[in-house]
Each structure stands twice: as structure tokens, then as C-alpha cells.
Image: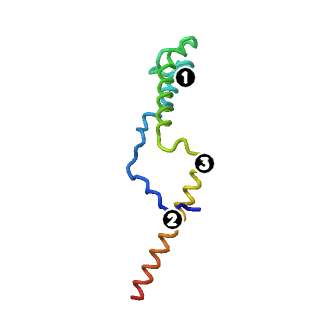
Amino acid sequence: MPSTSSPPLPSTQSSLPPPQTFDIIPPLHTLLSRLLPNPLDPNAQPSLSPKDLATEAAAIKIKIQLARSTVEMLPDVDRTVEEQMEEMRELEERIWKLEKVRKDIVEAAKKG
């Protein structure tokens, strides 16, 4: 059931972090490709010993931790799916009511 007071509409400006915050695939690919070097690629980075993997992966781990903490700071990330679905139902009902009012105004203008 919708609440009696209408919730404020979401802001149109995005407060999302930049996409680079979550871009871990290229550095991860580079790191993994160093484990299995391609002798046919003259531009390939030097081969990486498996024992050096943890050290080399540290920067990627830090980037993942930063991305995780960034996501945790986003608004409403702690809300359950059920809470989000309920809000969606309320907003859909609000849209339906506003659309009905708009149609009523159009009909009144046609008659008037």
C-alpha cells in the first residue's frame, strides 16, 4: 500500500563513482598473461614467476578493496530487494495516478 505522503523524486544528477573505480579486468588480464607468456608476441611483458604472483597482485587487490568500499558508501545499498520492490510498486502507482490526472485534464480541456 502506498504511503500517504509522496516520496521525493530521485535526483537527476548522478553521484556514482567514475567507471575507472571498477575497472579491474585489464590489469588482471595483464597479470595473468604474464604467467603464460606468448613467445610469439614481441611486445609481451617479461614472464612472471608464480611465486611473485602475490606481490604483483597487491595493486589489483587494493583496487578491488577500494571498489568494494565505494559500493558500500552508495545510497540505499543496504536496502533489501523486497524494500526496493515495494518502493517500485509505490512509484508505479504514483505514476498511474498522475497519468489519470493528466488524462482527466486533457478530457476537460477538450470539453471546455
Q: Farthest residue in the right direction?
A: 82
With 41 as the anchor, is 11 left or right in this view? left
Say the numbered circle drawn on residue 32. Answer: 1
Above or below: residue 87 compared with residue 42: below
Q: Which of marks 3 and 1 is in front?
A: 3
Q: Is mark 3 on a helix, strand or loop?
A: helix
Residue labelled with disc 3: 81
Say which of 28 and 96 sits in front. Answer: 96
The N terminus, quarter of image: bottom right
Residue labelled with disc 2: 94
x, y percentage for residue 101?
Answer: 46, 74
Marks counted in the figure total: 3
Above or below: residue 4 compared with residue 53: below
Say which of 112 and 64 sits in front. Answer: 112
The residue shown at (61%, 50%) is 82
Q: Is mark 2 on a helix, strand or loop?
A: helix
With 79 as the anchor, is 16 left or right in this view? left
What is the distance, in whole Å, between disc 3 and disc 2 at their CAs? 20 Å
What is the distance, in whole Å, between disc 3 and disc 1 at their CAs? 36 Å
x, y percentage for residue 14?
Answer: 40, 47
Say the numbered circle drawn on residue 47. Answer: none
Task: Give the amino acid type for the residue marked by disc 3 in the picture.
Answer: Val
Q: Do the residues labelled 3 and 2 touch (CB within 8 Å)?
A: no
- 2 or 1: tag closer to the N-terminus: 1
The C terminus, quarter of image: bottom left
Task: Give the amino acid type for the residue marked by disc 1 in the picture.
Answer: Leu
x, y percentage for residue 105?
Answer: 42, 79
The residue shown at (51%, 14%) is 55
